[in-house]
Image (cartoon, helix red, strand yellow):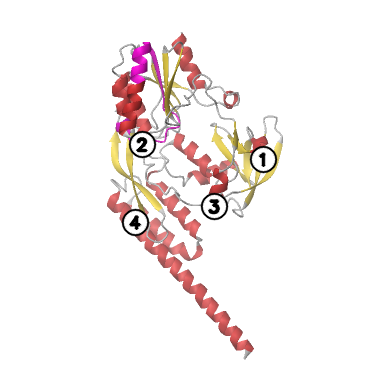
Amino acid sequence: MKDQVILICISLTLISICSAQNSRVENWNEDINYYHKALEKNHIDLYHTISKNEFNSEVLNIKEKLPNLKDFQVIVELMRLTYKIGGGKGDGHTSVPLWGMDLHKYPIKLFDFGNEIRVIEADENHKYLIGKKIISIDGIPIDIVYSKVSELTPFTENKQSSMDRTCNYMIISEVLEAIGIVKTKEKAKFTFIDDNGIEDIKTLNSYSKVEFDNFEFETAQVSNTYFQRAKDSKFKDLWFASLNNSKTVYIKFGEYPSEKEMNDFSEGVYNFIEQTNSESLIIDLRNNYGGDFFIGQILASWLNACDSIIWKSNVYVLINRVTYSAAMVNALQFKQLLNAKIIGEPTGANPNGYQDLGQFKLPNSDLTITYTKRLFRLQDIDSKGLQPDVLIRPKWDNYKKGVDEVLYWVLNDIKN
């Protein structure tokens, strides 16, 4: 009798497991069907890069693999497919961004200097890693890791945005586990090397979003010693300051406020320039992820009314790989409207391509999917990113010394 009871319990348990698995697969099937139909309905031109037949085949392939995939592996498959719609080909707004998920990250931040990946920030316990190059993760060479992660990163339009996004996603342990780089999401073995060629193998634990966000990161980040944000500034990344007895005005434009807030801010800049007869203008759009480019035009309209600026030669716009979306558009517009010289590295967004983000959520997983609503053509020729008039790429030797190469070039140009 006892053996029969045990067999019944085992049978019921197996039935329950099978039922749960079937329900999970059904839910993902429903989500994938919704994903497919919603993208076809809402995207301005879904098949501009991937053919409809190829897309349908990819969707079917994911469905067939569902019983053998964990939930996050399904998400990664959708990330990879969504990337094929236009990632790196001018459609970064179509993506699976992993918003709102409690992902685990290793306690470091990375930067791609073009031929090497270095640690530029780390929590206090790992600050000795700052400046070191990564050569492998769990024994997998970093170039292979980079290649695999770069095939699924969201919001990628060109090489510049891929450099930024790939570094951001290489520290997410769930992503590395799902693509077979690490064996477990809890920890991984990183191999570093310093500038003297000495290797250092460290096992790094991963931390939840709450833990990671609460870390006090030590940094090798470039600090601006020329201009300082005013303590009473309303915004962290929208402010202005002056140099050279107020003859040079620097505007940090790193975020988009409301229309009214931008109007008030721009009026303040205008009044300062008028009162001081400032002659040179620097607009810093680096590390601006975007917003509403029409709001950026408010700033341009106020600046255009300032007669003391030397408009022929002394207006500069600073850009980098993290000048995205509306910020890229405004950088190009400032070149056109304010006769600005563009200084820095190419932007992470393309002047010609698919822009303007819409989004929806999948009904069961609640996964967010973003898509493109508009097609912009802002210049006559196609280019991978807005190309600067003066190209200055980040170099580690300057970065570690706190030298802002781009701003240094501009100030020297004004001086001369």
The residue pinned by badge 4 equals 36
In contact (CB < 8 Å): disc 3 and disc 1: no
User: Which of the labelled discs sits on residue 398, or is there none?
Assistant: none
In contact (CB < 8 Å): disc 3 and disc 4: no
Q: Position of residue 381 (x, y in %)?
A: 32, 29
The Cα atoms of the two marked residues, 2 and 1, are separated by 36 Å
Q: Nearer the viewer, mark 3 or mark 1?
A: 1
Q: Disc 1 on helix, strand or loop? A: helix
Q: Position of residue 76 (x, y in %)?
A: 47, 53
The residue pinned by badge 2 equals 291
Query: Bounds of the magenta span?
Result: 269-295
Closest to the observer: 332 or 263? 263
Q: Earlier in the sequence, mark 4 or mark 2?
A: 4
The residue that appears at 30% across and 12% down in the rendered structure is 307
The residue that appears at 61% across and 53% down in the rendered structure is 186
The amino acid sitting under disc 2 is Gly
